[in-house]
Amino acid sequence: MEITRSNEHSRYELREEGEVHATLAFTERNGVTLLTYSYTEPTQRGRGLAAKLVEFAIEDISQDPTHKITPTCGYVRGWFANHPEHQGLLAD
């Protein structure tokens, strides 16, 4: 399993054996990353891939302590609700 950030496509990608199985789209504006849409291939759902993808993205974005996150994707909003230890990363 490999997770990468594709600035060209404005998304994070989770791949296995060269195939993209899950994506998390983002937009950056004024020091805030909006996590806008997550998608997992139907045949790959139920494996926790979206959670792994979100965790990778959160870790990546948090490398810049001045950068904040706005989750507009319902899945990502739910992830933050279940991980209160990361609330400090959210934009006001």
Image: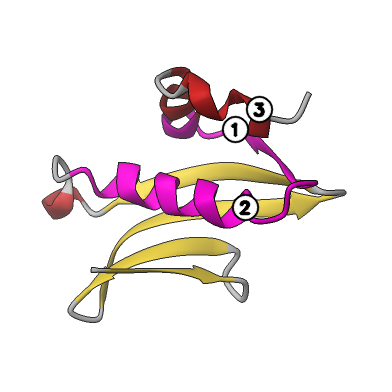
Which residue is disc 2 drawn over?
A: 61
Instruction: Name the colour scheme.
Output: secondary structure
From which residue to which does the magenta span run? 48-76
Q: CA distance from mark 2 to mark 3?
A: 12 Å
Looking at the image, the residue that sits furthest to the bottom is: 18
* Residue type highlighted by circle 1: Thr
Contact flag, marks 2 and 1 (Cβ < 8 Å) = no
Mark 2 / mark 3, whichever is N-terminal: 2
Secondary structure state at the residue bearing disc 1: loop
Residue 39 located left or right of residue 37: left
**Quarter the N terminus occupies:** bottom left
Q: CA distance from mark 3 to mark 1?
A: 16 Å
| Residue 72, numbered circle | 1
Above-or-below relation of 89 to 53? above
**Quarter the C terminus occupies:** top right
Which quarter of the figure has residue 79? top left
- Indicate yes or no whether the magenta region holds residue 8: no
Above-or-below relation of 36 to 70? below
- Indicate yes or no whether the magenta region holds residue 64: yes
